[in-house]
Amino acid sequence: MGRFFEARKHTIMARNKAVSKAFTRVIREITTAVKGGGEDPDTNPALRRAIQNGRAVSMPRDKIEGAIKRALGADSEDWAEAIYEGYAPHGVAVMVVTATNNPTRTVANVRHAFKKNGGNMGATGSVAFQFKRMGVFRIKPEHIEDPEMLELEMIDHGLEEMGESVDDNGEPVWVLRCDFEEFGTLQTGLEQANIEVTSTALEHVPDTLMELGEAEVEDVMKMVAVLEDDEDVNHVFHNLG
């Protein structure tokens, strides 16, 4: 019985840690968006996306509104995106997207994670050519009445690919991707079609995938987990199949 409760405690702690990190990421997105385009989501697409992402992780409305108010304050912190590149064990290409208010701290932590886990952090551009930066929209199936019709309509708004997938909770979602430059165009198209978007993101999608054995995959994912555990890291993208 003791082992059962101990395991359950660790599961709850891990879940709480994941929720806390998701909230932190959204707050930083909101802060950056407000500083760059103001507090009105109707005229600030970046803030609109950040609020959507907050709702996607069940962030309470008062926390979202509080983050917007704090971002308007003169003493609010400035967060900037920084992207680091390199290779995980076995030659897997990795892109690490961070939000930082202290680049010196962040780059040191990322470099340590690569080195300690058998990877090799590279210079800017060392692996980026293996990825395409794309805008990604995730939508619950119940919010799309006719997927084929929506796909045809959104092609005129920059849609490049659309398919079925699952979210982090294992729930089914439709995933729509567009070129990075078409992000705003596709977002506008979905809004005009009255499609409720669950979450949005700018992701680095690999051109080709690497296939590895089980032991090698474990080596790679160990390094990815260490990177994702860093508070400054928002996303880790790789080309592991």
Image (cartoon, rainbow, N blue to C red):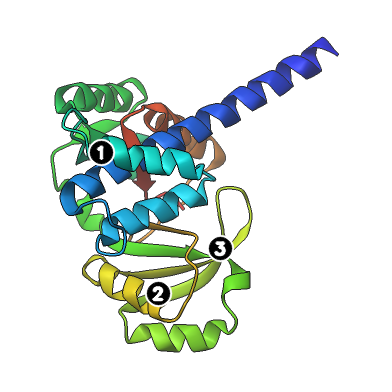
Q: Is residue 88 visible?
A: yes
Q: Which residue type carries mark 3?
A: Ser
Secondary structure of residue under mark 2: helix
Between disc 1 and disc 3, whose residue precedes?
A: 1
Q: Position of residue 188 (x, y in %)?
A: 33, 75
Relative to 154, 19 lies left or right: right
- According to the picture, the residue beneath numbered tag 3 turns out to be 165
The amino acid beneath tag 2 is Glu
**Image mark for residue 191:** 2
Say whether marks 2 and 3 touch (CB < 8 Å): no
Q: Which mark is residue 71?
A: 1
Q: Mark 2 Cα within 10 Å, few/some/many (few <14, many 20+)?
A: few
Whichever of labels 2 and 1 marks the residue nearer the N terminus, that label is 1
SS at mark 1 in the image: helix
- Distance from the alpha carbon under mark 1 to that under mark 3: 34 Å
Neighbours of disc 3 within 10 Å: few (<14), some (14-19), many (20+):
few
Question: Can see residue 96?
Answer: no
Q: Residue at x 21, y 36 (%)?
A: 79
Q: Secondary structure at mark 3?
A: strand
Task: Identify the residue at horizontal 41%, vertical 43% (top origin).
Answer: 64
Q: Is residue 168 left or right of residue 159?
A: right
